[in-house]
Each structure stands twice: as structure tokens, then as C-alpha cells.
Amino acid sequence: MVIAIRFSMHVFALLVVAASVSTLAIADDLPLEEFFGVYVGVAEVLDEKGQAIGERHVDMVVEPDKRDGFKTTTIAVTLADGQRDKPGVKRDVVNSAFVFDGDGVYLASERGSLFSKKKDPDLIAGDVLRWARIKDRTLSLFSFVIEPDGRYELQITDRTLTAAGIDLSFRRYLDGIVVRTVAGRTVRVD
Amino acid sequence: MQLAWNACPETKLCLIVVIERRPGCIGMSKENVILRMILSFALFLVAVTAEAQDSDAGVAVFFGRYSGTGIVHSKDADDTSMSLRNLDVEIGPSSSGGFEVRWTSLIRKFDGDVPSYMRKGLRVSFVPTGRAGVFRERSPGNPLDGEPLIWARHEHPTLTVYQLVPSKGGGFEVLSYERTLTEEGMTLVFRRLIDGVKVRTVEGVLKRETD
């Protein structure tokens, strides 16, 4: 009787370990909520040769939105001669909103109003296709468009969660060639 | 009442229409001015349309059969490898208007001294879009439904075919086949990007077999 119980305990332990391993494998991609927050930091702009051509201060918010989605607001201040208070300073604000579309994919929500008919973007006509996904610890935003001359432009923004905040990586491709890179680090402030 | 118009060669009209000055005639009537403006605009439209048609008709210089060899540069997850491919391309008119591209590649890989072979190919019909030099597949797919989107671009002497192929979980591939005419045939540069990372390049030279 005692031997039978010990054997069962071993089997039970093995089953618990197996379940834990399989759970870990499924939970490789971070949940969206882990990325919500307010972040500030700096980024460097590189040209197609990898040469630094500018510095930016970054202020970013990632927050929940309707239909299990999210929205982001990114304010980038491009410094002039390394300073914020000189003529030539530029400030860009980019807002994006995405809704969950299933299979780990988020699509840009660009419906203007409740009464406007939602239609899929027509890439051949020049519409922009925007989507996002999470892989491992990185939330990636993609933008794809076919230019009027038939070449394609691809933009990828990776936001990788770190212990302190988010690491940023932006690449812009033209016909498969990287023409602009921005890389930076931010810390979570809220 | 006559509208006085200085019809000297300095006016813009003279760029397109030669205005003859008859002795004693210092101006043109209002009706003649309007007529010449309409004629100028019509000639401008003809020039723009001809340029667009030229671009579409220019694809015909690619018609023919080509064969050759390509060198593959692959960057897999762990290593970089090279292999050879036999390339065959046929470009010709399509029954639905536009043109058709058919290509196959025989991939040779070597495991030590033992070769293995794999054949890949595709056949696509293209029709013009509203954009000069840009063509779409006759029945285009919708990437949001998981279908590949294929289009082509002609900027002489290069005809490029693109494929946007979505994959599960928001991933994607972009394939491009850049074919440039040469005296003897064409060169090919193939690029494959997966999620923005270049994983394969093929560079090949093909000879024209037939027109």
C-alpha cells in the first residue's frame, strides 16, 4: 500500500512539472497590459550608412483602448545642435490606435465614425496597411505602403520591454533597403 | 469688342503652338485665344497619355524565354549558406490583356558530395493599374485574409515583381524579383525579407532563348 502511494506521488509530481513546462512555453509572448505606461527617454537618428545625424527626446504613452486594443501617443522632439531651446527644434506627435483582430494580431483602427463603412485598405491604390503584434518581450508596429512608382515602403517600430522601461528601434525601408534607423531607450515614469 | 492679346513668341502658348504674326495684326480675337488654349490642353493630354501607354507597351521588350543560373546567399538562423539554382523565366502577353510572368527555379543543394534537388515556380498574370508603370495581379489577394498580394513595377530596363505574403501571428515576408534587360538576356536579383530581416538573396544571369 505504501509503495503504491509513493509511485502515485512520483507520477503526480511528473505531471505537475509537465504542466508547468507547457504553460511556460505558451506564455513566451508578454501580455499587452505589461506595456501600458508612460515612458520618457532619448533616441539617436541614423542615416542609411549608420551615421548619427540627430538626437531626439522621446515622450511616449501606451494605454488600453476599445475592443481589447491599445493606443499610443509618441512625442518626439528633434534637437537643434543638441539643444531644445534653439531655432530649428522640431516637435512631432504621432497617435496610433489598434484593435485586437485575433491570432495575436492588432489592426489599426481608422474608422472615422460609427456610420462610416469600414473597408480593408487597398494597397494597390496606395492605402497604408498598419498592424501590430507582440513577440516575446517586443511590441512591434508595422506600416506597409506601395508608393506611386510601385516601390514599397516598410516601417517597423519595435518596443522591447526592459526592467527600466522600453527600448525603441525604428527602421524605414524603401524596396527592402534600410534608409533610416532610430534607436533609443526610455524609462517608465508612470 | 475684341480682347487684346499679345501673341508674341514670349507667351506660354508658344511653347506648344507656333503663333504666326501676320503683318498689321497686333492682337488676336477672344475666340482665337480660347481655341488655342483648348488645343494646347488637348496636346498636353495626348502627351501625358502617350507617356503612360509607352510605359505599359514597354513591357513587351521583356517578352521571351530566358534561362540561366543563380547563386543563392542564405542567412538561416544559425549559419550562412550558398547554393546554386537553375533559373527559367518566360514573359509574354496575357490573354486578358497585360502580360504574364512564369518562372521556375531548380534548387541544387549539396550534402557533402550528394546533391538534392527541389523545384519551385510561379505563374502570374498582370494587368495595368491607374498608375503608370505599375501592374497588379489579375485577381489580387487580400493580405488581411492571409492571401499574398502580388504586383509589378516597370522602370526600363528593369521589371520588378513583388510579393507580400502574410504569415501567422502578424508576421510577413516580402519577396522581390528584379529582372533587368541586358544585351544577351537579363540579370536577376531576388530578395527575401522575413519580418524586415533579409534572409535570402539570389543573383543570377539569364540568356534569352527565344523572343
Image (cartoon, coloured by chain):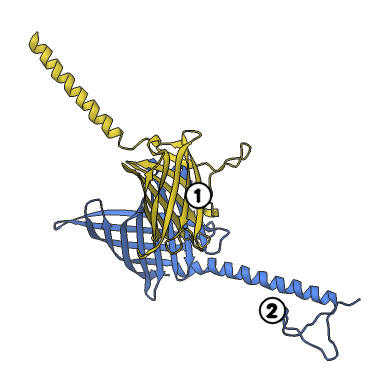
Chain colours: A yellow, B blue
Q: Amino acid at mark 2?
A: Ile
Q: Secondary structure at mark 2?
A: loop
Query: Of circles 2 and 1, which is in front?
Result: 1
For disc 1, the chain is A
Residue B27 is at least partly visible in this image = yes
Q: Secondary structure at mark 1?
A: strand
The residue under the point 20% across, 26% down is A17
Q: Quadrant of the N terminus of chain A?
A: top left
The residue under the point 49% across, 54% down is A145
State the residue position of label 1: A94
> Is residue B132 left or right of A187 when viewed as pictured?
right
State the residue position of label 2: B16
**Crowd tier of the residue under label 1, counting other residues whose Cα lies within 10 Å: few below 14, some 14–19, many 20 or above:** few
Residue B16 x/y as whole percent: 69, 79
The residue under the point 41% across, 47% down is A40
The quadrant where residue B208 appears? bottom left
For disc 2, the chain is B
The residue under the point 31% across, 62% down is B202
